[in-house]
Image (cartoon, rainbow, N blue to C red):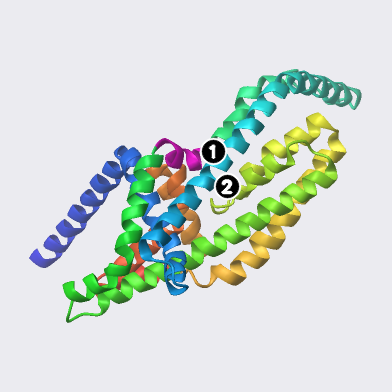
Amino acid sequence: MEDKISKLLMIFVAAALFVIVVAGMNAAASIINPFLVSVFLGILFSPLLFWLKRVGVPESAAVIVIVVGFLAFMLLFMIFMGRSLNSITLKLPAYQSRLAELTATVYAWLNEKGIDVAHTPLSDFITPRKVMNVFNYGLSILSVLLTNMFLIVLTVLFILLEVPLLPRKLQMAFPDSQGPQSHFKTFAESVNRYIGFKALFSAATGVSIWALLTLIGVEFAGTWGLLAFLLNFIPSIGSIIAAFPAILWALLQINLSAALWTLLAYLFVNIVIGSLLEPRFIGQSLGLSTLVVFLSMIFWGWVLGPIGMVLSVPLTMVVKLAFASDPRTRWAAIMLE
């Protein structure tokens, strides 16, 4: 009886500690996010660092090349998005009037068919500000990079300098156990594979959306493609969020037919890339069930915001490896598979 009470007490204590830790992470998200982004960028850039060293580039020079390349990419991205968002913002008021006209036409058509609906203008719900909120949500993925650029770059710099020394340190710290070294190697390889393929398929998604919308004649096709690239990192719902402003823009700029073609373009790209190619190359290698991936996106998104959604799969993989390292919690790792 006492054993059962003690086990039950341990469960309650563990649950209370879990709640405290999660609440603390949620409260400290603004501090944790830059650190997590730095760690995963360091892991992502480490294969490039080793490759540059193999071709004869000194370690310090290789680190500088990677950091400067990352900064150049972010600078070009900021310039492009700044110009695009400025142009879209200038055109939104005119398209707001177009939306009001379309709404009135739809209500008139419904009345002709004998369907009585409340005459609430759709433009009251879809305003320029709300449309821009979709952009802001997509860009919030990079807000951590932009607002904490100096801290992130400095942290990535030191991480890349430490990466070559890490295997030796792990071996010295755990001379009688290969567990930590094996877990770190498994985690690093899984994260590199996941983020690498995810970036590749996200880029393919963005380029495909840009090309198809250009053929349809939708304005700012490059911006919609870039938004699709960014939001594709969010599992399950990212592509849906990215499609909404492009479809609405096609409707307001051209007509209903163009909006339907835009919808079909997004469906085609996401079925081919998101449903066929991505699972084939990275789905089985994650070692996580589809349900766990979706639930982890919701959980980490609530705890850490949009950055948590993007990093939900790697973070869940860390939890799984931590569970797998202890025989007493290995059952939890199996449940995540």
In the drawing, does residue 217 fall left or right of residue 141?
Answer: right
- Quadrant location of residue 88? top right
Mark 2, secondary structure of its residue? helix
Q: Earlier in the sequence, mark 1 or mark 2?
A: 1
- Kind of residue indicated by mark 2: Leu
Residue topped by disc 1: 139
Identify the residue shown where x is 59% and y is 51%.
232
Residue 159's spot in the image, x, y percent? 32, 57
In the drawing, does residue 176 fall left or right of residue 306?
Answer: left
Outermost residue toward the left? Answer: 2
Mark 1, secondary structure of its residue? helix
The quarter of the image holding the C terminus is bottom left
The quarter of the image holding the N terminus is bottom left
Residue neighbourhood size for the residue with mark 2, other residues' Cα within 10 Å, grouped as few (<14), some (14–19), many (≥20): many
Residue 8's spot in the image, x, y percent? 18, 59
Q: Which residues are magenta?
A: 139-147
- Quadrant location of residue 313? bottom left
Q: Main secondary structure of the magenta part?
A: helix
Q: Are marks 1 and 2 in contact (CB under 8 Å)?
A: yes
- Kind of residue indicated by mark 1: Leu
* Real-space CA distance between mark 1 and mark 2, rounded to the nearest whole angstrom: 8 Å
* Residue 230 numbered mark, or none: 2
Q: Nearer the viewer, residue 26 or 291?
A: 26
Whether the magenta-drawn stretch holds residue 231 is answered as: no
Residue 126 appears in the figure: no
Identify the residue shown where x is 60% and y is 67%.
279
